[in-house]
Amino acid sequence: MLKLGGKGPAEWSVEVFDARDWPDEPEADAGLYRLRVAGKWVMDNGRKFTFFTVMGVALLIARALLKIGLPGDLDAGKPDLCKGQLIRWRPADETLASWGQCVMTRAGSDPIHCIDGQWRIMVQRNMVCCDEVQGLDRFGREIKPMAAKDVV
């Protein structure tokens, strides 16, 4: 736990907790954090457990302290996925991943930039992180990003 703040007003206290402190939560992956500001947990759309990337934590603190919007150069960029696109989803669940299981389906939404700093997409009525999804072409082959030398 990292605690920012001090003897000042309670609205300035920010506590950052490692997501691994909640091992039973499916989205509590290594490298993510949970925030408590002024003694209240930060939640996204009423979800009890919201976990943030380091960039998401930094941006939330910057927005709160400086009253600024999301700087474009800090935004990781919208993933190259779209609603209806054929995709392969490999769940982050270690048990399923170790079995090599994945789901081939169509994306249920365009990518959504959530308050936690992560891009998510609807897959079979579930919000999943875009880094768990691979775009496929119409033949079911992975779409690979073009190398800089291939761009004319």
Image: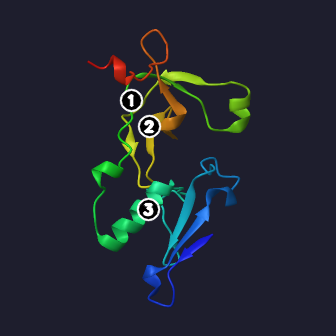
In the rendered structure, the answer to whether residue 41 lies left or right of residue 97 reads left
- Residue at the spot 50% in from the left edge and 22% down from the top edge: 105
Q: Which numbered marker is on residue 121? A: 2
Quarter residue 9 falls in: bottom left
Q: x, y (%) of residue 122?
A: 45, 36
How is colour applied across the structure in the image?
rainbow
Label 3 belongs to which residue?
Answer: 58
- Mark before the other along the chain sequence, 2 or 1: 1
- The residues tagged by marks 2 and 3 sit, at their Cα atoms, a distance apart of 23 Å
Nearest the camera: 63 or 126?
63
Label 1 belongs to which residue?
Answer: 81
- Looking at the rendered image, the quarter that the C terminus falls into is top left
At label 2, the amino acid type is: Ile
Look at the numbered discs 3 and 1 and tell me whether their residues touch, using CB distance below 8 Å: no
Q: x, y (%) of residue 129?
A: 50, 40
Considering the numbered disc 1 on the image, is that residue within a helix, a strand or a loop? loop
Quarter residue 145 falls in: top left
Density class for disc 3 (Cα within 10 Å; few <14, some 14-19, many ≥20) is few
- Mark before the other along the chain sequence, 3 or 1: 3
Q: x, y (%) of residue 8?
A: 45, 89
At label 3, the amino acid type is: Ala
In the rendered structure, the answer to whether residue 59 lies left or right of residue 124 reads left
